[in-house]
Amino acid sequence: MDLRLIVIALTPAIAIGLAIYFTDRYDKEPALLLLKLFMLGAFSVLPVIAVERTLMYFNIFSGLGASAYTAFIVAGLTEESFKMTVVLKTAYYKKYFNEKLDGIIYAVFAALGFATIENLMYILGSYSITPYVGISRGIFSVPAHALLAVTMGYYLSLAKFSYNRQIESNYLKKALFIPVFFHGCFDFILMADVPSLLVLFIPYVIYLWIVNLRKLNQYYQDSKERYKASHQSIKRTDS
């Protein structure tokens, strides 16, 4: 196995993971919990493959309909469902989930675990045919998984800190279906084989970056203000 391929596959996830980890400056999450999220996200690739292959048997559509089914249902719904399940089962009810930024951190680490294995499979499987697949996936696909996870984590945090079960349920639905929609659009543009749609790809990716960096910054500022308020309270108590 070519070590260079492993490096190409792992580097995007490592870079994004470190960036997200160091964004969480004021109340860092336990490293073991983040590692667990990453590993379970990686292992989720196996059931995802099984479900996706099963769903493909029910693809009765043709043309753009087939592309939409594959993009939104087979890929989008399946992959985002498993990534969200990892977060819900591993971190959502933990005591460490005590601020809104945490939801994004957890979702991104689960997504990066999934994206890393998916990237390895694509690179090792197609490098001899398309040597630049690792570079293109590193620029677009792996960051896309992380950006979708920011959206998921944003709504998971709103659900976590909501005031009643109905509001929590509504936000949990958004935590799943909004990333599914974004994911489906991303894949559909590439799968549809329509030149006019491909023109929209780069603007769409830029849109995902802008929207999700705003969400990340919003919760980062929330974490910062929470940290300042906590320390001011301690100072008043000491005095």
Image (cartoon, rainbow, N blue to C red):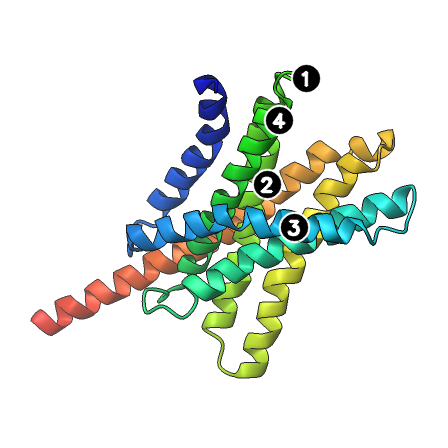
> Mark 1 — residue?
129
Residue at image position (52%, 71%) is 159
Q: Are marks 1 and 2 in contact (CB under 8 Å)?
A: no
Label 4 and label 2: CA atoms lie apart by 21 Å
Label 3 and label 2: CA atoms lie apart by 22 Å
Count of marks, rendered view: 4
- Name the residue type under label 1: Ile
- Name the residue type under label 2: Ala
Side of 122 relative to 68 (left or right): left
- Please tell me which of labels 3 and 2 falls first in the chain: 3
Between label 1 and label 2, give the one nearer the viewer: 1
Q: Residues within 10 Å of mark 3 (few under 14, many from 20)?
A: few
Residue at image position (44%, 29%) is 11
Between label 3 and label 2, give the one nearer the viewer: 3
| Whether residue 154 is visible | no
* Residue 75 placement (x, y as % from top left): 69, 48
Under circle 3, the secondary element is helix
Residue 185, placed above or below residue 228: above
Q: Nearer the viewer, residue 65 or 5?
A: 5
Label 3 and label 4: CA atoms lie apart by 18 Å
- Please tell me which of labels 4 and 2 falls first in the chain: 4
Under circle 4, the secondary element is helix
- Name the residue type under label 3: Ala
Between label 4 and label 2, give the one nearer the viewer: 4
> Mark 2 — residue?
144
> Mark 3 — residue?
50
